[in-house]
Amino acid sequence: MGGSIVLFGPPGAGKGTQAGRIVDLTGKPQVSTGDMLRAAVKADTKMGAEAKVYMDAGLLVPDSVIIGLIEERLTQSDAINGVLFDGFPRTIPQAESLAKIAVVESVISIEVPDDAIVERIVGRRMDPETGDIYHITFNPAPSEIESRLIQRKDDTEETVRARLEAYHSQTAPLAAWYSERGLLLSIDGNQPIDSVGDAVEGAVRATMSN
Ligand code: ADP
Ligand code: ADP
């Protein structure tokens, strides 16, 4: 019953920020490969150590590692009615592998131009206790939790340029791939967080009523 939804877009597009709203609407759990990789790095597993080299350089982690992670995640019982993929797939081989193991019912693409991305990424802050995402200018945290916020190691201006390059060369072609399959819904992500959220919600509701 029900397939999976893919949240697609460049680094800093607002995928993590909007994911909670889709989870609330659909009941599908969020599956973020970035979060899974950061957990593996923190736990200092062999896979985490391998992935860290790529992540710190702003490069994509090899497809074989990512596909293995996803295959394992989808065997968990909460994935039975589909999940919300955040940051996956990021290459055509990843999308091809996904198509063999799950049904994708829609791909919501949050579009943001490169010139807005750098400021978003460099100003991003995370609450390590809740996983909530803030921005020093666009979404400031309440002052009582400010001191515990962290900045991701790869959220520097230099690394974001490499990540954008990886996005354009390896990930952006997936938009056409999903569009050819009739699954792509594009949202203007270059507007305030709540407006993007309303547009995302509209796209999800349209999918659900199909
Ligand atoms: P992604 O998961 O796509 O990498 P995030 O959701 O982490 O993106 O958002 C990146 C940064 O941009 C965060 O600091 C977030 O607070 C901020 N942000 C998200 N959406 C918007 C928006 N519509 N306008 C301005 N800033 C935003
Ligand atoms: P953002 O959307 O803000 O760029 P993520 O948290 O999704 O960041 O990803 C952080 C890093 O983890 C990426 O730069 C990349 O190195 C790695 N990564 C995450 N998801 C994937 C994926 N599906 N394929 C390859 N690498 C990935």
Image (cartoon, grey):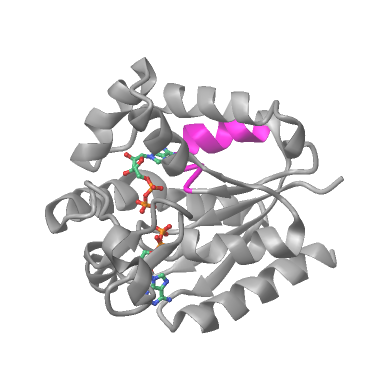
Magenta-drawn stretch, dominant element (helix, strand or loop): helix
Query: Which residue, as the protein is rendered here, is positioned at the far front?
Result: 144
Magenta stretch encompasses residue 92: yes
**76 or 110: nearer the eye?**
76
Q: Quadrant of ligand 1?
A: bottom left
Q: Residue drawn at (46%, 60%), measured in percent from left and top?
A: 132
Magenta stretch encompasses residue 57: no
Q: Quadrant of the C terminus?
A: bottom right
Q: Residue drawn at (48%, 66%), measured in percent from left and top?
A: 110
Location of residue 160 by image quarter: bottom left
Region of the chain picked out in magenta, as a range: 87-99
Image spot of residue 141 (x, y percent):
37, 73
> Does the rendering let one see residue 33?
yes
Query: Which residue, as the protein is rendered here, is positioned at the far top?
Result: 46
**110 or 183: nearer the eye?**
110
**152 or 164: nearer the eye?**
152
Image spot of residue 59 (x, y percent):
26, 38
Q: Is residue 202 left or right of residue 114?
A: right
Q: Quadrant of the N terminus?
A: top right
